[in-house]
Image (cartoon, grey):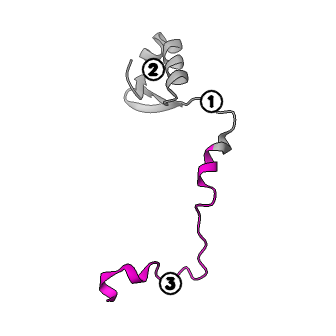
Amino acid sequence: MAEGAVSKSRFKARALEHLRHVQETGKELVITDRGTPVVKVVPYERDPAARLGALRGSIRRYADPTKPVAERDWDASR
């Protein structure tokens, strides 16, 4: 089985095998038509917002967004 991409004709012949592979590995599968991607099969997630949990608290707010960040780290300013 090809990793990551498969043609429509090969997918049709072994659809269940490909779908089980996506389910077991969690990796997406792109189905192509004459080399052009047309469909992406991804594993189902019950709570897609859970992925965003890792990003919580990682965003910073800058009071003056035009002021250079980490100005003292630049060699040119010394």
Name the side, left or right, on which 25 lies relative to 52: left
Q: Residue at x 47, y 78 (%)?
A: 69
Front residue of 14 and 26: 26
Q: Say the numbered circle drawn on residue 44.
A: 1
Q: Say the numbered circle drawn on residue 21.
A: none
The location of residue 20, given as percent across then percent down, is 53, 17
Q: Amino acid at mark 1?
A: Tyr
Check disc 2 and report its element: helix, strand or loop: helix
Mark 3, residues whose alpha carbon is within 10 Å: few (<14), some, or many (≥20)? few
Magenta span includes 72? yes
Check disc 1 and report its element: helix, strand or loop: loop
Q: Amino acid at mark 2?
A: Lys
Quadrant for the N terminus, please: top left
Sequence-wise first label, 2 or 3: 2
Q: Residue at x 41, y 29 (%)?
A: 4
Quadrant for the C terminus, please: bottom left
Sequence-wise first label, 2 or 1: 2
Label 2 to label 1: alpha-carbon separation: 21 Å
Q: Say the numbered circle drawn on residue 67.
A: 3
Check disc 3 and report its element: helix, strand or loop: loop
Mark 2, residues whose alpha carbon is within 10 Å: few (<14), some, or many (≥20)? some
Which quadrant of the structure image shows residue 8? Answer: top left
Front residue of 45 and 71: 71
Which stretch is magenta?
51-78
Establish if 74 lies above or below 7. below
Sequence-wise first label, 1 or 3: 1
- Residue to which mark 2 is pinned: 8
Which quadrant of the structure image shows residue 23? Answer: top right
